[in-house]
Amino acid sequence: MAQYTRVSGSVGLITLQSPRVNALSAAVRQGIVDMMQRALSEPEVKSVVICGQNGIFCGGADIKEFGKNMSGPPLIPMIHAIEAASKPVVAAIEGIALGGGLELALGCHYRIAHAKARVGLPEVTLGLLPAAGGSQRLPRLIGVPAALDLITTGRHVTAAEALKLGIVDQVTDHNTVNVAVKFAKRVAGQSLDPRRISTYPCPCPSDADALFEKAMQKVRRAARGAIAPVACVQAVRAAATLPYNQGMEREKELMATLFTSGQARALQYFFFAQRAVGKWSMPSGARWETSKPRPVHKAAVIGLGTMGRGITVALAQAGLSVVAVETQEKQLMEAKQAISGMLERGAKRSGVAPALDKVSYSHNIQPVADVDLVIEAVFEDMALKKKVFQQLSAVCKPGTFLCSNTSGLDIDHLACQTRNPELVVGMHFFAPAHVMKLLEVVYGPKSSPHAVATAMQLGKKIGKVSVAVGNCRGFVGNRMLKPYLEQALFLLEEGATPEFVDQVLEEFGFAMGVFRVSDLSGLDVGWRVRMADGLAQPDPTTGQPVRVRQGRRYSPLGDLLCEQGRFGQKTGRGWYQYDKPGSQVAKPDPWLHSFLDEYRTRHGLVARRIDHQEVLERCLYSLINEGFRILEDGIAAGPEDIDVIYVFGYSWPRHRGGPMFYAATVGLNKVLERLEHYHQAHPDVPSLQPCRLLRKLVAGGSPPIHKWREVIKKVHSQL
Ligand SMILES: CCCCCC/C=C/CC(=O)SCCNC(=O)CCNC(=O)[C@H](O)C(C)(C)COP(=O)(O)OP(=O)(O)OC[C@H]1O[C@@H](n2cnc3c(N)ncnc32)[C@H](O)[C@@H]1OP(=O)(O)O
């Protein structure tokens, strides 16, 4: 809807009204068309201001309408009519003007923004391009390089930057609508010809071909197979090389391909998935709306290794006071230096003062007595963590939340060490903790809804996307990773090379294949866990590693590499070789190939040709199958939780929506059929056995992903 009022005698004020972000739904578009007609037909009205209700100009097209039958007036003619109007139209931008919202503002003759407003064309993040003239008007207004940057990244810019770039004409600290109304009165009657952006020539640099070639290479490198960024470059190129009307035709053509693409569907699903995870629920019935978080002003971090340092930085940068505790004096000194460096570099990047004074350091636990929340980040060792939780429980003031950054240990065992187990939750950060967006908030059987709500709110405050998950070995992310890693090792045993497996996964869209990731994070990390689990020891009778452990197929390849001191990048050798320890350039290693040959011979394995399809299916479908088990077990509330974890924590390509959305795209019956096929070929690999929920979904006709929760509920009620 849009409301019309006459203000200050001669200004028609059109207010967009569509909670929460005044998206351009059919009703809003109809309202704009009708109210513009009214303003233009009233002789007393000399100029028009468009604004949005509740301090938000417009969040763009209504994404919920995509994929449905679009009704109401189309956006492009609506914007053209505004630009062609005979009376000046001023956009009063408060809050945000994004996507179609900014395109609407670009169709206006003037733009006035509040100092706190942000503008941008984020369509690329939804698998689209700015197709309501944005790709043709913005380069004409601010030039090709700046428009390419904004359109291909989708980044939001502040009002100050928008003014500098020339996107807005004025920025104000005062009431934006009042300022816009005054402005509209002043410009009434002035010629509008110089204000219609579509008539501007596109300022095009002399080396346009080279510029577009470079831009194309850059987006292709970053896009990991996403098609929208490429189409965005093509659309801007059309603006630079074609007259406006032909450019608009090209924009429409490119959009037609994107609009119906699977990638756009995946990215739009992912947009709503990110919002869905904030609406968490626990099997107990506790939910986000009814669970009140407690305020956290002061926090503590225990253990200042890599993770503890990153967590300290993330908390301090968000304005919290942090007590950083490290009992080893040398490590404490090093951590102080590292944390200060990270804070200084971060502050320089964002143009603010470094939050050095937010962090106080201690080599004992006493100063945590008055904090509101503690995050334990000591070495991943249950005995050590238990001891820390006992100490914290004794030292902290009543009501302090005690959180562990464990990546997979049992939260309940830690909660049992404390006087108030209801205050204990997991806060599983991902390295580097001040950079990675994901936070798994892990609730145990005793965790209170307040503790979960507080950890979720703290996550939001420090800029993380937080997902509430149940307590099990590896939680969601690492639990699903296990069968994926296992399949990758089995593929090596059967004839593949690390570089081939990685190539297939990188072509799929992962930033790095499984073996390159393993080299980066260090092979010894998993080795230590397997040793603690009694898996990595050689067979006591022969002294030879065996390929069966605990009754199922096991690959000791990773353990054997670790026994040789090959821990990955840090030792200069792992699944690949590196020029020197610490180097990041991975090269195939002939030693590793001979080692694999010898290994296969020793174990009577005959190498066979393994194709792309098998690598993808075995690695991804085993991971997806575990995802279904996680849903079946109630560890994640819905597929969106898993997908958000995988995109933000494990570099799953966003344009494929996450593993569960991908399974839905491939077809659940196909996933089931291929899992059955591989399980038949490898009956000693339980993770390939299709789980009950997957079978149930297929038997129920493979309902769309937004209906899975209903099936999951039924599965739970039958248990
Ligand atoms: C051939 C066809 C031609 C068609 C041409 C038209 C194409 C136009 C392209 C576009 O305009 S695409 C849309 C571009 N806009 C965006 O990408 C903005 C998306 N929104 C956001 O980034 C954020 O929501 C926000 C606007 C920055 C606000 O963030 P905040 O954290 O304050 O709130 P949220 O929780 O994210 O959102 C609140 C609420 O609003 C819903 N929502 C937000 N934006 C839209 C939207 N564009 N359409 C529909 N709904 C939207 C969001 O889902 C939340 O809903 P909930 O139910 O409260 O969870």
Image (cartoon, rainbow, N blue to C red):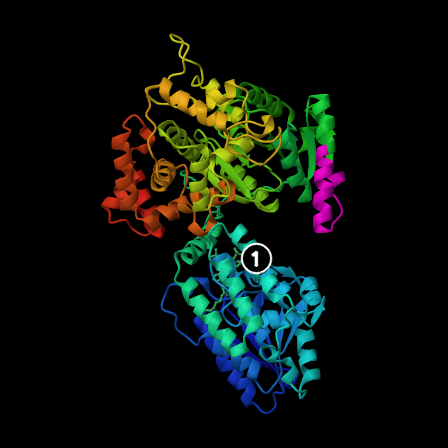
Q: Which of 422 and 477 is in front in this view?
A: 477
Q: Which residue lies furthest to the left in this view?
A: 699
Main secondary-structure element of the magenta-colored stretch:
helix
Q: Is residue 278 visible in the rendered structure shown here? A: yes
Q: Residue at x 53, y 51 (%)?
A: 221
Image-based side of 292 in relation to 602, left or right = right
Q: Which of 113 and 390 is in front in this view?
A: 113
Query: What residue sits right under mark 1 in the picture?
Result: 153
Give residue 206's position: percent from left, percent from top: 65, 68
Picture quadrant of residue 598: top left
Residue 596, compared with residue 39, is above or below; it is: above
Image-based side of 555 in relation to 402, left or right = left
Q: Which of 542 and 686 is in front in this view?
A: 542
Picture quadrant of residue 601: top left
Q: Is residue 372 visible in the rendered structure shown here? A: no
Give residue 353's position: percent from left, percent from top: 76, 47
Q: Residue furthest top?
A: 541
Give residue 255's position: percent from left, percent from top: 45, 66
Q: Which residue is drawn at 47% across and 20% down?
A: 560
Image-based side of 478 in relation to 202, left or right = left
- Identity of the amino acid at label 1? Thr
Magenta highlight on residue 340: yes
The quadrant of the rendering that contains the C terminus is top left
Q: Which residue is drawn at 61% across and 86% down?
A: 87
Magenta highlight on residue 327: no
Give residue 713's position: percent from left, percent from top: 32, 43
Q: What element carries label 1?
A: helix
Q: Which residue lies furthest to the bottom in this view?
A: 43
Residue span colored magenta: 338-358
